[in-house]
Amino acid sequence: MLRAVNVGSKSLADYHSIVSRDLMAEVRALAQPLEGKRVLHVNATSFGGGVAEILYSLVPLMNDVGLDAEWKVMYGRDDFFGVTKSMHNALQGEPITLTDEDKATFERYNLMNVGGLTDDYDYVIIHDPQPAAMRMHAPIDGAKWIWRCHIDLSTPHQDVLDFLTPMVEGYDLSVFHMAQYIPPGDTVPEPVIMPPAIDPLAPKNMALSPEDASYIVDQFGPDVERPLMLQVSRFDPWKDPMGVIDAYRMVKKKVPDLQLALVGSMATDDPEGVEFYQRSEDYAADDPDIYILSNLNNVGAVEVNAFQSHSDVVVQKSIREGFGLTVTEGLWKARPSVASNVGGIPLQIVDGQTGYLVSSIEECAARVTDLLLDPDAAKAMARRGKQHVRHDFLTPRLLRDWLGIFTRLADS
């Protein structure tokens, strides 16, 4: 039932002018002894969210340096994704308990998808909890299995963690964004720390001229001559869109011509997305200066790029956050940034240097106001943020880290 994703092709050489020569040389040196190794990535969706965006760039670059890499998406219906969304929320701390029927649904779909594992691979990378149980039933012998967890398991609801633990015991390694995300106790295979990254050459992050960005934003209604506050994220309770609206309303008292855009996508594995989109619209209460947009309004990668490139302040008001690639994107576009002091965001924002970290709606509003009223300081901070991303959070560095993991497992 697994469906192959067509990722096209990319060339590592195209990144020479963006990242350091030392990094490029390191990637080539690590890749050479791995030439021809077969790599399979499996996740739950090919659209929406950071995992899919990462794989669209990472997989073709793995192929470009000599590996034989592919990406497959598991089959699932609403009943399965309803269960996995509950699992996701519980593993991030919500007090949700799965019923026996939920557990049976999860296991049934994982077993159903194992039938797609018909080839021999050297490395199988399973992303997040949705396909985690496939390892228990897999027919592939000789492969090294890696569980790549993109969410924060530091304070999981114990019942759901106990359900997940037997599924991942058979993996050779587990990979987390941060050491703090590893669940308590001896519940996962040997963990490796590896933050994610963005592709600077993808349509979502490629350079746009100010004129092009303004033209695109203008098509969706905002007045491009007035200041714009932006959050890009899924419509999800963990992203706190209502808190963003509250902060905007506070800022607007001092910056009356401010506008707000909430821009996101509806991922196929997130059944709550439409509900929270509607709740956000209701909370906006017909404010003509609030724009709530998604792929349902024909907002794609280039349009998100335009909003990020044009905005005066980018915010990420998350309550919990695995890493926050939208923060990375805003920093890469040299946008003044304000984000919650949670999850992987502090890896990206050095408070007061590359952006501002905040812990409340009031603090978010105050920092956004500071940036809007002091544009020179805001621009200097944003330039430092871009350089931080260039050094630490671009795809060639992520490729190097994966090659290092493959080398480590090959020698084990």
Image (cartoon, rainbow, N blue to C red):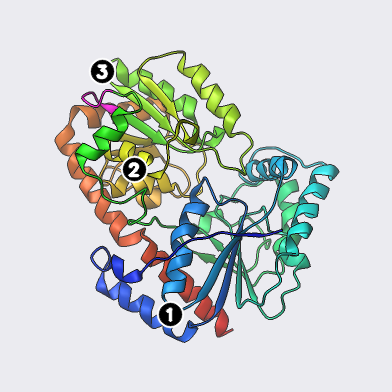
Q: Earlier in the sequence, mark 2 or mark 3?
A: 3
Which kind of residue does numbered mark 1 sit on? Ala
* Structural crowding at the residue carrying mark 2, measured as other residues with C-alpha within 10 Å and reported as few (<14), some (14–19) or many (≥20): many
Residue under the point 42% across and 68% down = 61
Q: Nearer the viewer, residue 319 or 329?
A: 329
* Secondary structure category for the residue under label 1: helix
* Secondary structure category for the residue under label 2: helix
Residue under the point 30% across and 51% down = 206
* Secondary structure category for the residue under label 3: loop
Query: Is-magenta flag for residue 329?
Result: no
Which mark is on residue 291? none
- Distance from disc 3 to disc 1, alpha carbons, whole Å, reads 52 Å
- Against 317, residue 129 (above or below) is below
- Distance from disc 2 to disc 3, alpha carbons, whole Å, reads 23 Å
Question: In front: mark 2 or mark 3?
Answer: 2
Which mark is on residue 31? 1
Question: In front: mark 2 or mark 1?
Answer: 2
Q: In the image, residue 166 lies at what x, y percent?
A: 76, 61
Reading the image, the residue beneath label 2 is 305
Reading the image, the residue beneath label 3 is 257
Q: In the image, residue 163 lies at what x, y percent?
A: 76, 53
Q: Quadrant of residue 221?
A: top left
Residue under the point 60% across and 27% down = 275
